[in-house]
Image: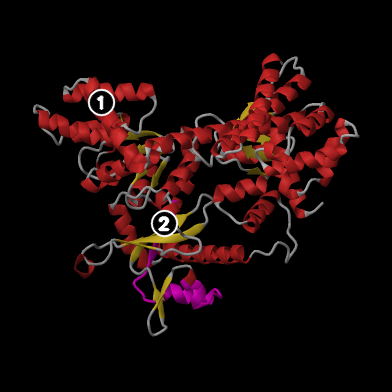
Amino acid sequence: MDALGEIKKRIDIVEFINKHVPLQKAGRNFKAPCPFHSEKTPSFVVSPDRQIWHCFGACNEGGDIFKFLMKWENLTFGEALKILAQEAGVKLEKGSFVDNDWDQKQKLITINQYAADFYQFLLEKHRLGNKARQYLDSRGVNNKTAKYFYLGYAPKSWDSLLKFLTKKGYTALEILAAGLIIKTQGNRFYDRFRSRLMFPLTDLRGNILGFSGRVMDETTKGGQEMKYMNTPETAIYHKRENLFGLHQGHKDIREQNEIMLVEGEFDAILAHQFGYKQTVAIKGSALTQDHLRLIKRLTNRIVFALDMDQAGQEAIRRSIEEAEKFDFQMHVVNLKSGKDPADVLQSKADDFAQFYKDKQTIYEYLIDSYSLKQDLSTVYGQKAVIEAIIPYLANIYNPILFDHYLRLLSEKTNTPGETIKRALFDYRRKQKQGKKDQSGFATTRESDKKKNVEETLENYLLALLVQTSEQVYLLKKAGQELSENDYYSPSTYKLFKLAQSYTETTPKEILEQLNQNLPDELMDSYNRGFLYDLPTGDIDWKKEITKNILKIKKYSLKKQIQELMKSENETALKLKLKELTKVEKTLSII
């Protein structure tokens, strides 16, 4: 058995995926909401029998354990292979599956790890770290927490880290690629981080991708030096994807089904120290779609605990529209005092606990915060609040939630709900007109709907092929009724064309022949059939097969008729209309 087969043998795909996505038993397979797009109805299916997964929703993707890890962590095949080989205890032969990108990334991670060890040693055990230790103490961070987050200290020297890493065998260019040093115009190098408290920035696995360095004396250089300095974009560090504290908190996030978002590293560190281990920092105030995709894999509930200054409140408002696309439940911890979470936790931890307990839903918070800025005893104040809130209400399509917040806004502004509804509908109408002509929008929605029906019918046909014992009947019936143009997917047509060459054998032999001879490019279509649920009970499978094939034919004929109506070929149009009538009549009596 080769390395790939041995890895698949040792790692069960259901157990592996279940560590990342909670799966529920569904017949002989397992289901979950797809982790790669937002959805309410679970369409992500995992088969323990075939050790594969497939999304029957918007993604329409699938594969084996390697493909899942590649998509989950945005890895190349070589990267996923080496991670899974390590987890399975399978030794890869030297030179096999060469992946230069992986080797380069691993080198940068190793360099960063050495740098973190260097910084951490200076903070914990060297006299140069005295000032940093005193600073941490003044911020309320204890030794246990400092070790937990692997905090460190970058000395004032211009080249101490450079010298340390050079002795470890790395070149200046390799250290530069990790973002740890800066190159001058004179081709000299010096340490990027100097006289700073160091926060390692990690991925979900704990690999150190970069650093954030904070000055401890904000009066340095007249206050002109940046408070925080981050690793620049490198082959492994991308700011828009990184959440500080996610490695430390991801298990608690999943267990509590909640993530608390704060602004800075100290906010996250103090939150963990005081027991809020589901907390991560978003490195400033920009919550990106990459962040939200990552969060969605762990939880569907976000609690914002950002600074209550203007920038923090604006960050909350900017985040709502993006987060709504992923169908998150959102709440806000209103700190009221204007201080950031770290300050409140350090000085009055009980107050923070009460603020957390009293957290509001995102829309309650918005209504209250806008209302405080206006004089609601005047019609102009009421109008200002309603106009500010309407763009947020426009994103709510759940009728229960919509009615709740509409009533809340109505009571707060003393304005009839019907009046607010009219203003909201007017806003939505203007938004639609601004983006696209209404008829064009409707046509697109209708097209998507038809596409989903055709995909579903074809997936059902594949399931009937591989999960029933009526393969011979199905293949002959499909051969009689369906032409190449009737199939939604070209790969499904090719698969059926190949399977039809085996109809002189038994049902079992048909599947065996397909398993042995199916080209790789058709394997995804074949696997989909094993993951699609068939109805249970006393089913007449030949009747079910006939109905499904005729429905596929019906949708194909309707598409052909639409095209012919644009032309002047009345003879061909009449023939297709006659054929459609015959198919619909047969369907009505089956």
Q: Badges 1 and 2: C-beta atoms under 8 Å apart?
A: no
How far from the left and from the top, in percent, is residue 94?
73, 65
Left or right, 281 with respect to 387, comes to right
Left or right, 321 with respect to 488, comes to left
Report the residue that reaches farthest toward the left: 378
The kind of residue tagged 2 is Lys
Work out which quarter of the rendered image holds the C terminus and state it. Answer: top right
Magenta span includes 169: yes
Residue beneath the point at 36% across and 69% down: 155
| Label 1 vs 2, first from the N-terminus | 2
Left or right, 128 with respect to 507, comes to left
Task: Name the one closer to the observer, 97 or 346.
Answer: 97
The kind of residue tagged 1 is Arg
Label 2 residue SS:
helix
Residue that carries the numbered disc 2 in the rendered image = 239
Q: Which mark is residue 422?
A: 1
Badge 1, how many Cα within 10 Å: few under 14, some, many 20+?
few
